Amino acid sequence: QEYVSACLKSLRWMVSGSAALPLEILNTWKKISSHTLLERYGMTEIGMALSNSYLQTRHPGLVGLPLPGVQIQVVANNREVEDGEDGEIWVKGPTVFEEYWKLPTATSDSFSGEWFKTGDIAKKTINGYKIQGRNSVDIIKSGGYKISALEIEDVLLQHANINECAVVGLPDTQWGEVICATLVVSKTLTSQSLDLFVLKYLPKYKKPRRYVFLSELPRNTLGKIMKPLLKEVLLKEQKDP
C-alpha cells in the first residue's frame, strides 16, 4: 500500500462522479492517496452541470455550484424551493440534450419548458448542492416523511465492521414504506447493536426497521449498486421465506 500511495500522490487531481460520494469513502481515499476527491454532478442528458472548485476550497458532501452557462433550480410541487429545502434538480443550458431518440412521451415528461427534470433530489446550500438521492430509488416515503437513503448509508458506513451497505424502502401497508438496510459486514452484528449505533446520529424515524446481511451487493458494470434489483430480491424473500 505504501507503494500505491506514493504513486497516487504524483497525480494532479482525482474526480468523483456517477453517484453521491459517502463522506467515509472520501476520508479513507484521502488517507490512501493524499487527494481530496473533486466532487461533481452530471448525467448523460446534461453533461457536467455542477462542480466543486479545482483551485479553491472543496466542501465534502457537496457537488459544488453550476458550471459556466448552466442554470440550476431545485423544484418541489412545481415551484422553486428555498435554500436548504429538498427538491428535484432542474437544469437548463446549452449542454442539455434535445430529446430521447424516438421517445416523444419520455421526452415530454422529462421537460418543463426548457428545464430538464433530472429526477435527482438535492438541496442548495451556500457552498453548493447536496445530493439526497434518486427520486425513484433513494427517497423513501415512510410515515409521512421523505427520507434520504444516502443519509442513512453515510451513517452506516462509519461503522467499523460495515464494508458496504445499501438502504431501500420496502412497501408497507401501515407506513407506506419501511427502511431496510442491506449490509456486507466483516464481523457478526446484531440488529440491536446497529439500532444503538444509528440512533447516535439520526432521529428514530430514520432508523432502519430491518437489517439484511449479504455476502455482496448487486452491481452493474459501472460498479453502481442496483437498488431496483435488490428490492426485487428482498420482496421475493418476503413472499417466499
Image (cartoon, helix red, strand yellow):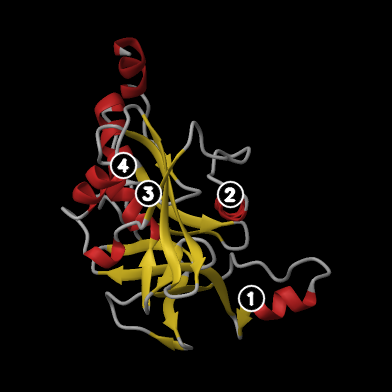
Q: Which residue is mark 2?
A: 237
Mark 3–mark 2 distance (CA, rounded to whole Å): 37 Å
Which quarter of the rendered picture does the N terminus lie within? top left
Secondary structure under the numbered disc 3 in the rendered image: strand
Residue at the extreme front: 241
**Label whose residue precedes the other's in the sequence (3 or 2):** 3
Provide residue 77's location: percent of width, then percent of height.
46, 88
Q: Which mark is residue 157?
A: 4
Q: Residues within 10 Å of mark 4 (few under 14, many from 20)?
A: some
Q: Earlier in the sequence, mark 3 or mark 1?
A: 3
Tag 1 residue: 110
Assess disc 3: are there few (<14), some (14-19) or many (≥20) residues with their C-alpha within 10 Å of its C-alpha.
many
Are circles 1 and 2 on residues that touch, CB within 8 Å?
no
Name the front one of labels 3 and 2.
Answer: 2
Label 2: few (<14), some or many (≥20) within 10 Å? few
Q: Earlier in the sequence, mark 3 or mark 4?
A: 3
**What residue appears at the point 36 percent right and 67 percent down from the top-left corner?**
147
Q: Is residue 237 left or right of residue 33?
A: right
Given the image, on which type of amino acid does mark 4 rest? Leu
With 95 as the anchor, is 89 left or right in this view?
A: left
